[in-house]
Amino acid sequence: MSGVPVRETVLRSATKEVVMASNRPFCIIGERINPTGRKVFQAQLRDGDYSAIERDVRAQVEGGADVLDVNMGVPLTDEPTLLVTAVRMVQSLTDLPICIDSSVVEALEAGLEAYEGRALVNSVTAEDERLAAVLPLVKKHNAAVIALPNDHDEIPMEADKRIELVGKIVRVATEEYGISIDDIVIDPLAMPIGADSTVGRTALETIRRVHDTWGLNLTCGASNVSFGMPSRHAINSSWLPLAMGAGMTSAIMDARTPQVVDAVRAADLLLGNDEWGGAWISTHRRRQAAAEAAAAAAASATTPEAAVAT
């Protein structure tokens, strides 16, 4: 990408900063705080029970998330109120920055008002109406935004059309709303490989061209590509390093899956974004210590003294 500067997308909580960039470690955006497809979680939220959020925050942080995606899209509820409650709760539990995720503009606005920091907004498309609704909020709250290169006509299946729409998004965001180009994060539209074996190549081409043309940061829903296929973790842990090599700098993913997280961190090491392997080594030392502690606890629970105590 000769002549294209490295773009830095800066996200902040009240006390912590995370920078997304092509010369930085890959940014894992923990996806679990989302009721989509989780009927029990949805029922709990309707009843005012937020205990699952605390468990999900803990699991994503322990798994290595750098940012947490927060979505409260529960049908037949007051989503803005739910999202405000969730944002405040998450911020009370962790210092990781938040990605505020909703298709409802009123919920995005409420979440941004409640958030203490510099958020990532998920998301906007290239549709004129959606750009006009979301980008003023992004500008007002000094946020960054994930943008998808599809419009009211279709989800483009060709990389050329996606690049055309990325160009539109960049032009409108920077020229009409004064948003910094560094704060535009592109989703290349990674689609299920089980439905069409060509979509992986198209997404990778889109990533390379966005990276080489504008230097923008990119993200995607990491599990989208494996949807409907067996051994999804194996597919995801292969897909992400390929995408990273093409220029992708983050992904919305489940940080509870060590196989996929390890693939990302190994790719960071191999791409030169983990100096001297410090993060890779410390992660595995931490896991080894935790495994040894668990083994010791299990052993002590089976000693004769423990048996007598029980």
Image (tube, grey):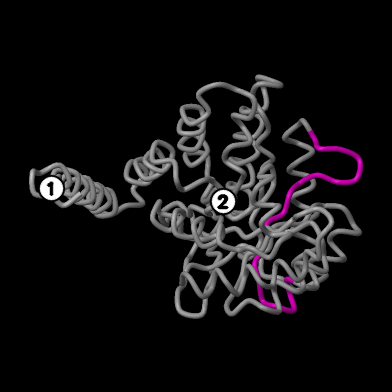
Of 297 and 235, the residue lying toward us: 297
Q: Nearer the viewer, mark 1 or mark 2?
A: 1
Q: Quadrant of residue 153?
A: top right
Figure check: 213 above or below 237? below
* Residue marked by disc 1: 308
Of 134 and 41, the residue lying toward us: 41
Q: Secondary structure at mark 2?
A: strand
In space, the residues marked 1 and 2 are separated at their CA atoms by: 41 Å
Of 196 and 242, the residue lying toward us: 196
Which of marks 2 and 1 precedes in the sequence? 2
Q: Position of residue 25 (x, y in %)?
A: 41, 54
* Disc 2 crowd, CA 10 A, few/some/many (<14, 14-19, 20+): many
Q: Residue at x 19, y 44 (%)?
A: 298
Q: Residue at x 57, y 72 (%)?
A: 89
Q: Position of residue 294 (x, y in %)?
A: 22, 47
Q: Which mark is residue 32?
A: 2
Q: Which residues are magenta?
A: 138-156
Badge 1 amino acid: Val
* Disc 1 crowd, CA 10 A, few/some/many (<14, 14-19, 20+): few
Q: Position of residue 191 (x, y in %)?
A: 68, 33
Figure check: 277 above or below 235? below
Specify whether residue 139 is painted magenta.
yes
Q: Quadrant of residue 45?
A: bottom right
